[in-house]
Image (spheres, rainbow, N blue to C red):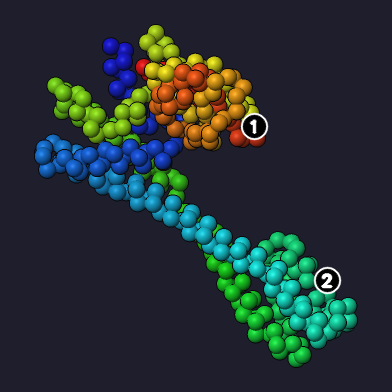
Amino acid sequence: MKRLFHLFINCFLTMKVRNHKKMSKHSTTNYEALKANQNTNPFIKELFLKTAPVYTAYHNLLGDLVSTKATKKGTVLSFYNYLKTLRIKLKEWDIAIQGTYKEGTPEYVMLLPNGKSFILEGTQEQIVQKFTGFSNNVHSNPELDNIKEEVNAYLQTLLAHYGSKNEKLSVTETSTTELDLAYDQMGKALYYNMLMLTAHFIDNPLSVEDYFDMALLRTHDKETEEEESLIVSIPAATSKESGFSIAETGRYLIMSRSSFSLQYYGAATATELPKTAPRELVPGEEIEVSGAELGAPANRFLIFINPSTTATGEVEILQVE
């Protein structure tokens, strides 16, 4: 009976860290299943119509956040890439200037008082300011008509990239509070759907599995008399053998209790390095893996890697089969 009472805990909102990757995946699973079956059952259609606006609101906000981050990243990268070409262009213009003024002469020093490399030193803002000064010096010199147009064109493009970068970085991202509220509403909707579907399919409870990723229905609250879990702490910048023995036929639930990503892999010894790329465990994630997936019976040890250089990571492991 104790396990039945776990159903009253909203397993969609019991994660310590909000996990949009997980919520996105499982809300889509439920939404698509309701949508596909809405015309075959009036009860399912009613659930779908209640879920659709909540689903749309959450995914629209999440999409805005992802899009904003992608746009910012692309704009910043464009500026960085354009800035990299400045070193090459300065060398070309320096050669052209020395065709008129020998390096070290007063006329040359007036154009590049601290040398061309000085322009590339300092913050991005300082680099833009110093290059603007160089462009003005070239523009005011009647003997450098051969490079004036090119230098000015480069400056205008650089200023455009710089302005765009700053504009994108100043754009306020989707309010965290707004997105969190939508996340909570989505979690409550999924929980409501789970309870309603459980009641609706009371004579055929396995049908509920058609509407959810069943791993999500596990809660973090375990009764030690029924299910034994293991908490593992992984110190910063280290790898640690979990002390959890892997069986080929076993299935294991691995739950992140960290606010940053960890990695894990199966190994034949407690000190063996990974033979392939370790798997990632993102913040708040709860995944179910088999012993065979971890390489058992050859691999009996479950090892975690903490890439953080400052914080201790923590996971919870539970054998479910």
- Of all residues, the one furthest to the top in this rendering is 225
Label 1 Cα crowd, 10 Å radius (few <14 / some 14-19 / many 20+): some
Assess whether mark 2 and mark 1 are in contact (beta carbons under 8 angstroms).
no
Nearest to the observer: residue 299 or residue 313? 299
- Residue that label 1 marks: 237
Residue pictured at 46% horizontal, 20% vertical: 296
Residue pictured at 83% horizontal, 84% vertical: 101
- Of all residues, the one furthest to the front in this rendering is 298
How much space separates mark 1 and mark 2, taking CA atoms?
Answer: 43 Å
First of labels 1, 2 by sequence position: 2
Estimate the x, y position of residue 75 in percent, counting from the top left. Answer: 53, 62
- Residue that label 2 marks: 114
Quadrant housing the C terminus = top left
Note whether 286 is above or below 152 in the view shown. Answer: above
Instruction: Tell me where residue 121 sits by quadrant.
Output: bottom right
Q: Amino acid at mark 1?
A: Ala
Estimate the x, y position of residue 279 in percent, counting from the top left. Answer: 49, 33
Q: Amino acid at mark 2?
A: Asn
Q: Residue 174: which disc?
A: none
36 displayed left or right of 281: left
Instruction: Tell me where residue 192 sits by quadrant.
Output: top left
Estimate the x, y position of residue 39 in percent, counting from the top left. Answer: 12, 43
Could you tell me if residue 253 is visible in this image? Answer: no
